[in-house]
Amino acid sequence: MPTIHFIQPNGQTTSLHVKEGNSIMSVCRDHGFEEVLAECGGSALCATCHVYIDADQLALFPPPNEVEHQMLEFVASERKPTSRLSCQLTINDQCDDLKVFLPSQQI
Ligand code: FES
């Protein structure tokens, strides 16, 4: 199982072994990271599951589709080139050592 490092806004890092096939959003919710609200439950309709992916690891995922691209316009924290909706990111076998930065605000 890949190990993913979740970095909270205060710098605290939590490293978790996660199952492939889950979304990063569901891992955040299951682990109780309050930074990820995920109000729509993963339908790419709320933009409250915003995360930043380490810039060197963005290519581990397909680029945002048009819906995600549009929803990223509505994120509460600064939108950066590394911004993604975590509900649209499925953990795969290449994700070992992935760094996911949680934003300070979702609404
Ligand atoms: S959970 Fe709503 S957009 Fe990801």
Image: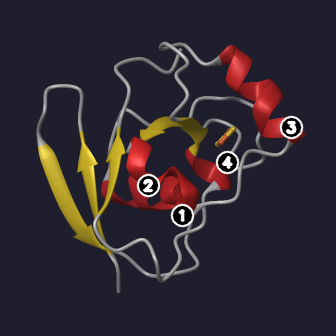
Q: Residue visible at 74% across and 44% down?
A: 64
**Assess mark 1: CB under 8 A from ligand 1?**
no
Q: Are marks 1 and 2 in contact (CB under 8 Å)?
A: yes
Q: Residues within 10 Å of mark 4 (few under 14, many from 20)?
A: some
State the residue position of label 3: 67
**Assess mark 4: CB under 8 A from ligand 1?**
yes
Q: Are marks 1 and 3 in contact (CB under 8 Å)?
A: no
**Residue 42 position in % (x across, y down):** 69, 50
Is residue 61 or residue 47 the one in the foreground?
61
State the residue position of label 4: 41
**What's under tag 2, amino acid-wise?**
Gln
Mark 4 or mark 1, which has the lower sequence index? 4
Q: Are marks 4 and 3 in contact (CB under 8 Å)?
A: no
The answer for how far apart the CA atoms under marks 4 and 1 are is 23 Å
Q: Secondary structure at mark 3?
A: helix
| Quadrant of the rendered image holding ligand 1 | top right
> Which numbered tag is attached to residue 86?
none
The answer for how far apart the CA atoms under marks 4 and 3 are is 15 Å
**Residue 35 position in % (x across, y down):** 37, 32
98 w.r.t. 86: above or below: below
The answer for how far apart the CA atoms under marks 2 and 3 are is 22 Å
**Residue 32 position in % (x across, y down):** 32, 49
State the residue position of label 1: 60
Q: Nearer the viewer, mark 1 or mark 3?
A: 1
- Residue 55 seen in the current view: yes
Q: Secondary structure at mark 2?
A: helix
State the residue position of label 2: 57
Q: Secondary structure at mark 4?
A: loop
The answer for how far apart the CA atoms under marks 1 and 2 are is 6 Å
**What's under tag 4, amino acid-wise?**
Gly
Q: Residue visible at 42% across and 17% down?
A: 105
Q: Nearer the viewer, mark 4 or mark 3?
A: 3
